[in-house]
Image: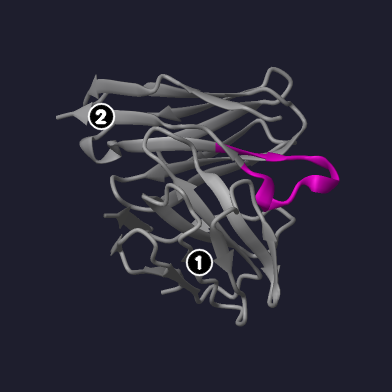
């Protein structure tokens, strides 16, 4: 059974720092991996989606990388801002014939606080 | 703007009552999903539907029921059989069940059992 782990569970850094959030998964046979942002009491907002054949995706100050063979993904946030404060979740979708979006496995998230 | 609308945002229920959470999308997506989120936990799939009049159980379907009579609507009923219903419920949709689809979420409904 796929397991997704996010480290650290919580992180607090001063504004302006570059930071890295980690996501690891136990089964490397994935279809894609998606990073989400969740603000308190709100739904999830998709940030980046990386297909299994890709190594990275970029959107503005965000860069997500994928190393499928080692079961790892990182979300890099450049020049962090207080508005980046949120919980960041990664979700892995299985590959193969069972690779429907219903098969997503979510991590528990990293709670990020950017201090002004 | 296209998106997913969940209602109500907050709901209180007495033990033994059934409640229904609404989920409506105007994205023309075929697939829709219901997740449950508990504090400090990852999301867990309750039910999903890939087409009208069809739906499948997820990992934690016991005590829940759904219907998919229209493409844009996927309501979730939390029945009295659900032992621990207090949670944050999230509805999501994707263009299709398969393929490189981004999952789009609603804002969530928080259910509290009194």
Q: Position of residue A104 (x, y in %)?
A: 63, 43
Relative height, residue A107 to residue B76 (above, below): above
**The stretch drawn in magenta includes residue A96:** yes
Q: Secondary structure at mark 1?
A: strand
CB under 8 Å between callouts 2 and 1? no
Give the residue displayed 27% in from the left and 36% down from the top. Answer: A85
Near mark 2 (Cα within 10 A), the count class, few <14, some 14-19 or many ≥20, is many
Q: Chain of mark 2?
A: A
Q: Which residues are magenta?
A: A91-104
Residue toward you, B88 or B82: B82
Q: Secondary structure at mark 2?
A: strand
Query: Residue B76 shows which numbered tag?
Result: 1
Query: Residue A74 shows which numbered tag?
Result: none
Viewport quadrant of the N terminus of chain B: bottom left
Give the residue displayed 47% in from the left and 49% down from the top. Answer: B36
Relative height, residue B7 to residue A78 (above, below): below
Residue toward you, A95 or B77: B77
Quadrant of residue B20 within the rendered picture: bottom left
- Return the residue at label 2: A113
Same chain for mark 2 and mark 1? The answer is no
Viewport quadrant of the C terminus of chain B: bottom left
């Amino acid at each position: 059974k796929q397991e997704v782990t996010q480290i650290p569970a919580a992180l607090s850094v001063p504004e302006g720092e570059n930071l890295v959030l980690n996501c690891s998964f136990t089964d490397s046979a994935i279809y894609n991996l998606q990073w989400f942002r969740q603000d308190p009491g709100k739904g999830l907002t998709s940030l980046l989606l990386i297909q299994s054949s890709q190594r990275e995706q970029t959107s503005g100050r965000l860069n997500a990388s994928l190393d499928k063979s080692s079961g790892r993904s990182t979300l890099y946030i450049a020049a962090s801002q207080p508005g980046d404060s949120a919980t960041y979740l990664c979700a892995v979708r299985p590959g193969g014939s069972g690779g429907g979006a219903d098969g997503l496995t979510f991590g528990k998230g990293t709670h990020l606080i950017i201090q002004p | 703007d296209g998106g997913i609308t969940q209602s109500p945002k907050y709901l209180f229920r007495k033990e033994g009552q059934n409640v229904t959470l609404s989920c409506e999308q105007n994205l023309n997506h075929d697939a829709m999903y219901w997740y449950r989120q508990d504090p400090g936990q990852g999301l867990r799939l309750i039910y999903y539907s890939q087409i009208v009049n069809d739906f499948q159980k997820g990992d934690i379907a016991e005590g829940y029921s759904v219907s998919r009579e229209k493409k844009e609507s996927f309501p979730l009923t939390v029945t009295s059989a659900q032992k621990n219903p207090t949670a944050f419920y999230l509805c999501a949709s994707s263009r299709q069940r398969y393929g490189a689809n981004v999952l789009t979420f609603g804002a969530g409904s928080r259910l509290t059992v009194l």
